[in-house]
Image: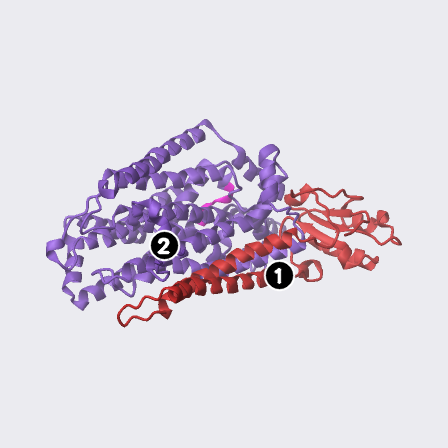
Amino acid sequence: MAAETSYLTGARADLEQSELAEEHLMLDPRPREEMNQMVMEAMTTTTPVYWAWVGGLALIVAVCLFGVWGYMTATGIGITGIRRPVFWGVFIVTFVFWIGISHAGTFVSAILRVFKAEFRRPFTRAAELMTTFGLAGGAMYPLIHLGRVWTFYYMVPYPNARWLWPNMRSPLVWDFLAITTYLLSSTIYLYLPLIPDLAMARDRTTGLRHRIYRLLALGWRGTEAEWHRLRKAINIFAFAIIPVMFSVHTIVSWDFAVGVVAGWHSTIFGPYFIIGAILSGVAAVVTILFVLRSTMRNFKYFIRPEHFDALGKLLLVFSMAWAYFFFNEYLLSWYGGEEAVQRILTLHATGPSAWVWYLMLICNVAIPWLTLWNRRIRRNPLAMFFITLAINVGMYAERYTIIPLTLGHQRMPFDWGIYNPSIFEISIAIGTMAMFCLLYLLASRAIPLIPVWEVQEGQMAHSLKKVGKAHVPSVTELE
Amino acid sequence: MITEPIHLALFEEDQINEAAEAISILRSQGVPDRNISVISGVPLSEHILGRPMSWSRVGLIGLVGAVAGFLAALAITYLPVLIYPLNVGRMPVFPIPTTLVVVFELTMLGLLISTLLGVFVETITPSYGPHGYDPRIAHGKIGILFTCPPEVDCESYDQLVALGAELTHNLQERKLWP
């Protein structure tokens, strides 16, 4: 009898352990060689469908983005729907949208790294890549919006003939500096943890790929000094890039808030924009993870329902935080009683474009709150894909409400107007979306999207510990 | 630069304890720490392997970059105003709050770019200790590279083999970077 009990206990323990391994990537280790092979296979496998997507997206980028932008530059910005009183339209809305998306990488990679959230390990690089490409898309918009793009050099301080110097303290210069700083630092932050994986790719490739990886891996061998240096640099970045991230979207919000424009001149715009950016960025990470998991070979091993579950919880928290800031901003503006602001708020909720305002609330509040409390929904990648798409639609609607819908009804009723985006503006917005997807698609076959060494490090640190009659996951501090 | 033949003791990825033990054995045989180098596919801290602490100047280089960024920010915000002061009714010529934004961004930019430069500079700077590489390191294996003083016979390190090491003698240095 005693032997039978022992046998049953052992069988239950095995079942418990296999369930935990199936659940947690960190408790389901595979030999490093096998993981390297899985990542390399995903990276080097292309199908005709892949090339069809690359070709299609490249065509959209060429026609909708560069073709239309070229046409607009040659013809003049009058072909857009931007005219008095709305001078900021879809270009600025999409600019804010992309800058918001770019917060994902830093949040997921830097903040979760600082707080040692273990679930981050397999998808930090996918998120960092989003930051870089999102910023690349966003950074184009100030130039596109400029219209006469060739006059960009006016912002550069140089001793010109009339001795006129640009005002280096202007909010537009803040914007330029913040985006440049964030773009450069997030690209470096993407590159540094990539070095060991580039060395792995270097050792497994030949020809041109090998030469490129050899150059980028900086002669990496994995010595103690190299790891020490890398860790130090990553730590500096993880801490330093967080305030930079906060500053970027704060400065984007100041583009609006520093003007005495009704509906914009608010001290809460900085944090309100940041929380919205993190909400849209984390949502975009989930969307991308679903696409990667569904389309790339072997990614189902690395990206599991536990990751969607963890990110789903974060999304629910950020959705609530966004609602808090939205309500705070709304209530105080409305209660303050300034007539122009009250008119704008009433217009948002009851005017001809009220559907945009309701779409924003449905997608950013109703959908996440009604779904993400449920563990089964959070663990369903397809459901999470649609929920996160909806959140980003909602965040786009939020920016549309804040920008053209607010500008159209300012203090002077004789100057009210309705903004209708032209096909050229919509085309350019679609073009940058295609550019983001194209860059991501190309990068997925050029760099290892899974940081294998970080996954292995995590798997080494995790083990099952027997507590009473149960086996529970335990993490060892290896650093 | 070390000219003696380089030896490699290669351990499996789960043999961290054995690798740490092997380092102790080498040390007890008279191989100094400067003639030992550990290469691995995951970061193994010095205290895990019982090795002397590594050092790096990346932080210091980053700090220098931050100072440079700070000075650059002061230059671009103050110099144009010094050259061409614009007096706008009762507005300060040198407004501090708006300058702080530029100072912050450029200081951080200087810090972050110079941190990368620090990594790059330290990478190309000649390093001490035995050089050598085996592609199996990226498979997660742990390698101990060592050279022996002339009076020690490295070929007879049966103790390392007993710990599970795969020994390679006279390792050829591979050129990994242009």
The local secondary structure at tag 2 comes to loop
Which residue in the protein does label 2 denote?
A: A161
Name the main secondary structure of what is drawn in magenta.
helix
Q: Residue at left 38%, top 34%? A: A57
Q: Residue at left 42%, top 61%? A: B76
Pinpoint the chain carrying mark 2: A
Q: Which residues are magenta?
A: A301-307
Amino acid carrying label 1: it is Arg
Amino acid carrying label 2: it is Ala
Asked whether residue A29 appears in the rendered view, the answer is no
- Using the numbered discs, state the Cα–Cα distance from disc 1 to disc 2 in whole angstroms: 45 Å
- Which chain, by letter, is red? B
The local secondary structure at tag 1 comes to loop
- Disc 1 residue crowd, few under 14, some 14–19, many 20+, Cα 10 Å: some
* Colour chosen for chain A: purple
User: What mark, if any, has residue A200 been given in the picture?
Assistant: none
Which quarter of the picture shows residue A167?
A: bottom left
Query: Is residue A338 rendered to the left or right of residue A315?
Result: left
Q: Position of residue A336 (x, y in %)?
A: 18, 68
Q: Residue at left 87%, top 50%? A: B153
Q: Nearer the viewer, residue A310 or A208?
A: A208
Placement of the C terminus of chain A among the 4 image quadrants: bottom right
Which quarter of the picture shows residue A466?
A: bottom right
Query: Is residue B139 rendered to the left or right of residue B154?
Result: left
Residue B112 within the magenta-colored segment of the rendering: no
Q: Which of pointers 1 and 2 indicates the residue nearer the eye?
A: 2
Pinpoint the chain carrying mark 1: B
Which residue in the protein does label 1 denote?
A: B57
Q: Position of residue A41 (x, y in %)?
A: 55, 35
